Amino acid sequence: MLFDTYKNEERIWLTTIGAKTSSGKYAFRGDLIVKQGTMNEAANKRNPPEAIIKEGVILAEDDKLLMVVGNFASVTELPEFIERFTPDLADDCRPVFYIDNLKENAVVDIDGRPYTLISFSSGMIWNELLELCYIEKADLKGQKTEDKVETVYEALKSFKPKFPQATLEEVIANRTENKREAWGAV
């Protein structure tokens, strides 16, 4: 299974949900390391990750990612994702990333695969994703937690972004200095 490989590669940073759906797919919510931190020889451990999908919402079959949604702090992390995870994406997977320093929403075509990039400054990815898919929390009532991820996946299949086309180079060059607003206990 793909997530066993990620676990062995120490790519799972935080798991909120990690279980099979009723249909046998694997639902994951949490943080996934895109690029490992360098090894700190003095401390005999790795430095924090250099690129990470925060608040990821991922659905996978045994060896392919069907849906990948999450947050990047910087659009400069996207090329790391593309390099490392493209072989794991199912043919019809259309990743959606909420990005803190993205100047404006865009659809970026990478080797024939559309990536939907959404400028993001505050909130929770799960709530933003439900809104994007026009899913009310009442629509998920009574479902097992992992089945909710599959319900979102089914809704996301019909999502047609109305954002302008851009190249990866353009969105990286036009990035801002914005950082996600901090929230939670102070």
Image (tube, rainbow, N blue to C red):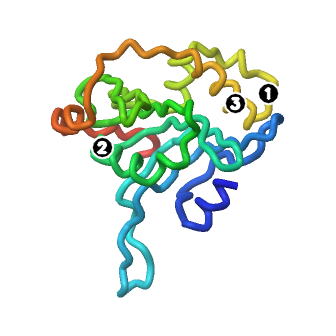
Question: Type of residue at label 1?
Answer: Gln
Dots 3, 1 in contact, CB < 8 A: no
Residue 43 vs 160, above or below: the answer is below
Q: Nearer the viewer, mark 3 or mark 2?
A: 3
Provide the residue designation for mark 2. 74
Give SS at disc 3: helix
Left or right? Give the position of 144 relative to 9: right
Give the mark, 2 or 1, whose residue is nearer the N terminus. 2
User: Which amino acid, by three-letter code, is at mark 3?
Assistant: Glu
What residue do we see at 53% from left, 60% from top?
11
Residue annotated with mark 3 = 150
Q: Position of residue 109 (x, y in %)?
A: 36, 30
Quarter of the image for residue 8 reads bottom right
- Indicate which label's residue lies in the foreground, 3 or 1: 3
- Tell me where residue 1 appears, x and y as whole percent: 70, 55
Query: Dot 1: within a 10 Å radius of its alpha carbon, few (fewer than 14), some, or many (20 or more) residues?
Result: few
Say which of 143 and 165 sits in front.
165
- First along the sequence among labels 3 and 1: 1
Q: Which residue is mark 1?
A: 143
Q: CA distance from mark 3 to mark 2?
A: 27 Å
Establish if 76 lies above or below 102. Answer: below
Indicate the amino acid at tag 2: Ser
